[in-house]
């Protein structure tokens, strides 16, 4: 399965990715999103959606 990354420099902490794919992304203490969960067949579409909706284009497949 592919893996996904959040560019900590680009993330503006909007939180949309956590709403869209809560089992993959979480907010850290700096109010930036981090990948904490594994991408699976079940949540892969949510990750794609998070990539599309992130206003900072901070999320990408690795
Ligand atoms: Fe950050 Fe984009 Fe998520 S701005 S909190 S990576 S939707």
Image: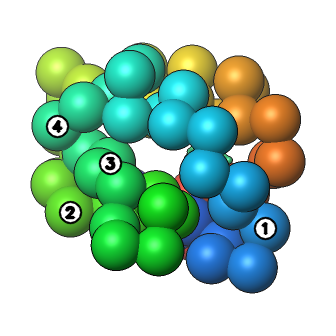
Query: Mark 4 sits on what residue?
Result: 23
* Depicted 32 relative to depicted 12: above or below: below
Q: Residue at 34% across / 67% down in the picture?
A: 28
| Callout 1 secondary element | loop
Disc 1 vs disc 2: Cβ atoms closer than 8 Å?
Answer: no
Query: Mark 3 sits on what residue?
Result: 25
Mark 3 and ligand 1: say if the CB distance to the nearest ligand atom is below 8 Å.
Answer: yes
| Callout 4 secondary element | loop
How packed mark 3 is, by other alpha carbons closer than 10 Å (few <14, some 14-19, many 20 or more), is many
Q: Earlier in the sequence, mark 1 or mark 2?
A: 1
Question: Can you say which quadrant of the picture contains the N terminus?
Answer: bottom left
* Depicted 24 relative to depicted 52: above or below: below
Mark 1 and ligand 1: say if the CB distance to the nearest ligand atom is below 8 Å.
Answer: yes
How packed mark 4 is, by other alpha carbons closer than 10 Å (few <14, some 14-19, many 20 or more), is some
Query: Mark 2 sits on what residue?
Result: 36
Q: Position of residue 57 (x, y in %)?
A: 81, 48
Question: Can you say which quadrant of the picture contains the C terminus?
Answer: bottom right
Between 44 and 35, the one lying in front of the other is 35
Let me know if residue 47 appears in the view: yes
The circle drawn on residue 10 is: 1
Q: Earlier in the sequence, mark 1 or mark 4?
A: 1
> CA–CA distance between discs 1 and 4?
21 Å
| Callout 3 secondary element | strand
> CA–CA distance between discs 3 and 2?
6 Å
């Amino acid at each position: 399965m592919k893996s996904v990354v959040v560019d900590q420099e680009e993330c503006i902490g909007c939180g949309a990715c956590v709403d869209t794919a809560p089992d993959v992304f979480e907010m850290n203490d700096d109010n930036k999103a981090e990948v904490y969960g594994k991408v699976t067949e079940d949540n892969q579409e949510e990750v794609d959606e998070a990539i599309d909706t992130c206003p900072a284009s901070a999320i990408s497949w690795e």
